Image (spheres, rainbow, N blue to C red):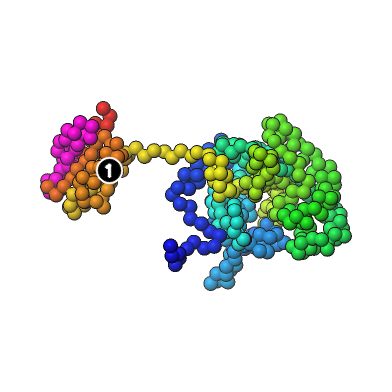
Amino acid sequence: MKKPKFQSPTGMHDILPEDQKYFKKIYDVVSSVADFYGFSKIDTPVLEDAEIFSRGTGEATDIIKKEMYILKTKGGDFLALRPEWTPSIIRAYIEHGMYNLPQPVKLWYFGPCFRYEHPQAGRYRQFWQFGFEVIGEKNPVIDAQIIQICYNILKELKIKNLIVEINSIGDNQCRPYYKKLLTNYLKSREVSLCSDCKRRIKENVLRVLDCKEEKCQIIKSEAPQILDYLCDECKAHFKEVLEFLDEIELPYNLNPYLVRGLDYYTKTVFEIFYLDSQSEKDIGNALGGGGRYDKLVKVLGGKDVPAAGAALGVERIVELMKKENIEVLEKEENFPVFLAQLGSLAKKKSLRILEDFRKSKIKIAESLGRDSLKAQLNKANKLNVKYCLIIGQKEALDNEVILRNMETGHQETIKIENVVEEVKKRLKK
């Protein structure tokens, strides 16, 4: 078959009708959980000032250096398609003076992001995320609750065999010393690192720990661990987070090399993986992750406000649900009434009738494009409707409609202006 001339852009994809049920299911679960925990929904523009991300996410991150879509407007402004949500939400928090609200401010979101990266399984250039942000609270219980919320959403979607990988990357007090130690260790082995990691030693040394190249993973396995160099405050904070997770019996692994690819994180970072039931190892990409970012509000021009959050990838969850044959039941369409018509004048009357039924909140099916009464009645039978309204040229001229009981075959003629009330009466019986 010849390929169509126009196709979706590389790395971007259509969400077809058969996948909409998965997106709707995920949205409904996220919305319900967010409502229970007191989160308010926020939507931010898809386009933001590019500097929001370069300052917030980090100049040396792969997202900013390689993956961000940037455009220059006619007015000379540089805008970026959002590669992630958190800096946008912090911008909105500052811009709208949300620090004057009772703290913490709890926000959730659901929508598309854009990153220019090599398309592969679970990775798209336009992809959907949902997530949660808690702004204005430094207590470690918030870190644990965000992890719990993300974990519970996945469980409610019937995804089993989940594990949380968790670490602390310290803060501005203890992390500089650790970065110096790590840099010295890696420089002595620089010749064995991949080209990206050789660059990262100078620009963003922690990102070496996140590299997926096998030779880099071998080197990092013997690198100094940041947990051994946390200051007292970070150590106490992380200890409490783990104690909260123990209390709710949430499964986790300490991963001293987990750093996440965003510069704004402080203290707690985590990712959630799906474990293969056979090997008990995580497979593929993380379903989501997050952590604490106590300095981001200040970096973007606001007050010194602590915060924590997380995001999960919708497409990755959908793919896993399909892989695990997790059934998503669609609500069956139930039409009690069908409208059949014959002729152009009847079609005109039909549009008014359909609108009257819509206003009365009575579901009514139709097949306006067809002229064959037999074909229309066959469709009405397949839909198992209780009543069929039939309007032909004569009925249209007389401002009438035939009301047929599909079970008994009995039919009667009634005025169009009375049809909604007559159907209502019969449906109540």
In front of the other: 181 or 120: 120
Which quadrant of the view contains residue 61? bottom right
Residue 404 lies in magenta, yes or no? Answer: yes
Q: Quadrant of the C terminus?
A: top left
Q: Secondary structure at mark 1?
A: helix
Badge 1, how many Cα within 10 Å: few under 14, some, many 20+? some
Q: Measuring 76% from the left and 44% from the top, which residue is drawn there?
A: 255
Q: How many marks?
A: 1
Measured as percent of width and height from the top left, residue 131 is found at 60, 46
In front of the other: 351 or 12: 12
Q: Where does label 1 land, which residue?
A: 379
Measured as percent of width and height from the top left, residue 165 is found at 71, 43
Residue 4 in sight from this viewpoint: no
In front of the other: 278 or 60: 278
Which quadrant of the view contains residue 140? top right
Residue 57 lies in magenta, yes or no? Answer: no
Q: Measuring 14% from the left and 45% from the top, which residue is drawn there?
A: 395
Residue 106 in sight from this viewpoint: yes
Q: Quadrant of the N terminus?
A: bottom left
* Region of the chain picked out in magenta, as a range: 395-418
Measured as percent of width and height from the top left, residue 124 is found at 57, 56
Q: Measuring 76% from the left and 64% from the top, which residue is drawn there?
A: 195
Above or below 119: residue 163: above
Q: Measuring 83% from the left and 63% from the top, which residue is drawn there?
A: 191
Q: What kind of residue is marked 1?
A: Lys
Measured as percent of width and height from the top left, residue 335 is found at 31, 38
The residue at the far top in this view is 429
Above or below 190: residue 101: above
Residue 399 is left or right of residue 206, and the answer is left
Above or below 94: residue 103: above
